[in-house]
Image (cartoon, coloured by chain):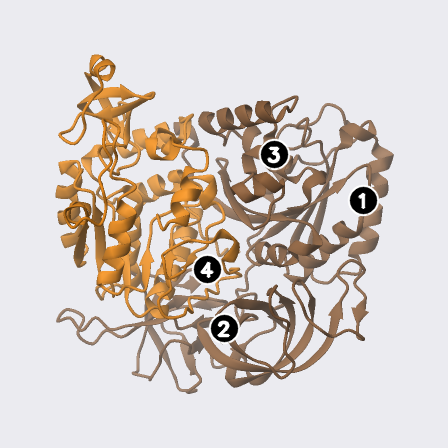
Chain colours: A orange, B brown
Amino acid sequence: MHTYRVTHLKQLEAESIYVLREFAAQFEKPVLLFSGGKDSIVMAWLARKAFWPARMPFPLMHVDTGHNFHETMEYRDKFIADIRAELLVASVQESIDKGRVVEEKGPKASRNGLQTVTLLDGLEEHAFDAALGGGRRDEEKARAKERFFSHRDEFGQWDPKNQRPELWNIFNGRKLHGEHFRVFPLSNWTEMDIWQYIKLENIPLPSLYFAHERECFERDGTLIAKTDFISMLPEEEKSLARRTVRFRTIGDATCTGAVLSSAATLDDIIDEVAAARQTERGNRSDDKRSETAMEDRKKQGYF
Amino acid sequence: MSEERGYLDMDLLRFTTAGSVDDGKSTLIGRLLYDSKNIFEDQLDAVEASSKQRGDEQVNLALLTDGLRAEREQGITIDVAYRYFATPKRKFIIADTPGHIQYTRNMVTGASTANLAIILIDARKGVIEQTCRHAFIASLLRIQHITVCINKMDLVDWDEDTYQKIVQEFKDFASRLESVVEVTFIPISALKGDNVVDKSTHMNWYQGPTLLYHLETVYIGSDANHVDARFPVQWVIRPHSNEYHDFRGFAGRVAGGVFKPGDEVTVLPSGFSTKIKAIHNMGEELQEAFHPQSVTITLEDEIDTSRGDMIVKPNNQPKVEQDIEAMICWFSDSKKLQMRGKYILRHTTKEVKAIVKEVKYKVNINTLHKIEDDLEFGLNDIGRISLRTSSPLFYDSYHRNRQTGSFVLIDEFTNETVAAGMIL
């Protein structure tokens, strides 16, 4: 008997491609937010598939905190050329220079919170009315109720009580002037799905995801890479050492923790993720600031 | 773990759970995630700390699925939350919805994409109004598999007679429902873990599967419609490049049936026929496409086709009509359904205007009785209406196809999604 079976990865792919096409069709000026992390890489990869052999009908925008690992930037430029996409950069440094935001002081300062302003400014400058994000519902509990099409008011704020119900595969992207949408095509993917799909599709990744040697120090139980953007407290300096590490997420270099790991290949990483006892955001200090940190940041317009 | 890496061959099962604060739904989900080792240390640490703070005697697994702050403060779940877990056989997506009558719209939303519904019954209480409501919604949304978990068996001394009595009560009620294909009953204790992931040692009289085993093995391969070929066009791909100068692809997701290169097809609404030249998934050319695949179809002849059109087979066409009869669930808490009111109707990839011609009846979802004397639709009301659309819809009955038989109504002024509809 002929069976019509679609594996879980192919179902997720089909769903995301469907969402990406709805996104392109329902908005006038859409944009894809590209962080350089694995989720936004997979999202951009799927966008290329969705519109092949045409180019994707929207540009990519990178919110650049200026605190990047150089590997991320090298990778970004090559990847974007490979998928034939157009890149725009919104710079946090520029927001600081213009006085739009004030940088946090002290050794634990992070530009993470400032990104929101730069992001909203960037969206406004180009008059984008909808932006794609690589957020997944399994990442954090505030995201578990996020919609594929997430409505934001004119201040970019997310009101969890005022989200539109999503039934079947019908998405309602209608909006009033000035309002916008964040659209999350990877909503139903887990970290494991992302890794398995990267393997299945043989998607190139930044080298930071694989085990390498790096000088790191300990901060609040997390390993932070020594970079030019961060200053260590005296006791942190004592913990500075070369270690074999990799990153499970890639964000701002000052607040993304490394994990001790010898996983050098995708297969190693898949094994490691399967055996992991900590969520991937477990070592992002930005989420640890309070138990509802993510919910609060989302309400202000964070992805 | 390497021996378990069969992930290139895993299925996906979407299920919904409905329940209220007391019947142990959050505990059940927490138990499923915990015993199937899908909980991380930092999540468990956070829950242990919260449990202690609240003064709970043991680690409160229900806290694992408690979401937003507003909910934690009120101790209720106010929206659909999606949870994920996987075993080596399947990946699972749980649409976790509150079960109180005031959250009917959330239950309907969660049920709309589910293959299976878990209905929880408190063994001490048996079949109550809420059970009937959940079963009715599952059947209305055409969920083909219902799993009834009779929970808190530990509180009735693991008694078989109690269990059998509840099974019979549920069967009596379910015989009045349409469209449910399969009902499975499992006696469990979510709190103690019996028959959730691990087999119970307290109920040797029960020979059936544990809940997880059932979720892993229930056959869902024939749930989708593979008979009536339906392809709503989502987007037209025209690369305008030298390499693909004449490429004109119709992108979309197969909503039903099977399409193959060489098949004769008709494009609606124009009615012109041609053949399928190729089916693409990026560089890959497919020999067939079926639900839920997203593909790009090229045709032999150039036929004017755009978003909202539908590619079908000439000898098996959907209904093409402007007068629609449907069951709807009303979603808006600020506005009532307006008789003769105009709404935006979204169906597949098409958007039209619709006017409400008639309200036939509402359903009391606890008793299944028709209400014909009060026809005002407010939040959470379910019932039957007639609509007329500004241009024809290409549709099938919801019973036959969930994709081509469903729609939403949108308020013209606020853009709020105000109703979900299932075409009769």
Work out whether disc 4 and disc 3 sit on a shared chain. Answer: yes
Q: In terms of sequence position, does the residue under pointer 2 or pointer 1 come before the other?
A: 1
Between the C-alphas of marks 4 and 2, the distance is 19 Å
For badge 2, the amino acid type reads Arg
Q: Verify CB contact (< 8 Å) between mark 1 and mark 4.
A: no
Q: Nearer the viewer, mark 2 or mark 3?
A: 3
Work out whether residue B86 or residue B214 is closer to the camera in this orientation and state it: B86
- Residue at x 39%, y 38% (from the top left corner): A192
Instruction: Find disc 2 in the rendering and name its residue.
Output: B346
Work out whether residue A131 or residue B171 is closer to the camera in this orientation and state it: A131
Q: Nearer the viewer, mark 4 or mark 2?
A: 2
B81 relative to B241 in the view: left or right: right
Q: Residues within 10 Å of mark 2 (few under 14, many from 20)?
A: many
Q: Verify CB contact (< 8 Å) between mark 4 and mark 2.
A: no
Q: Verify CB contact (< 8 Å) between mark 4 and mark 3.
A: no
Element at badge 3? Answer: helix
**Tag 1 subunit:** B
Q: Nearer the viewer, mark 4 or mark 3?
A: 3
Q: In terms of sequence position, does the residue under pointer 4 or pointer 3 come before the other?
A: 3
A123 relative to A275 in the view: left or right: left
Work out whether disc 2 and disc 1 sit on a shared chain. Answer: yes
Work out whether disc 3 and disc 1 sit on a shared chain. Answer: yes
On the image, which quarter does residue A211 sit in?
top left
For badge 1, the amino acid type reads Val
Q: Nearer the viewer, mark 2 or mark 1?
A: 2
Q: In terms of sequence position, does the residue under pointer 1 or pointer 4 come before the other?
A: 1
Q: Which mark is residue B167?
A: 1
- Residue B187 lies, in percent from the top left, at 74, 36
Between the C-alphas of marks 3 and 1, the distance is 26 Å
Q: Verify CB contact (< 8 Å) between mark 2 and mark 1.
A: no
- Residue A86 lies, in percent from the top left, at 17, 59
A131 relative to B88 in the view: left or right: left
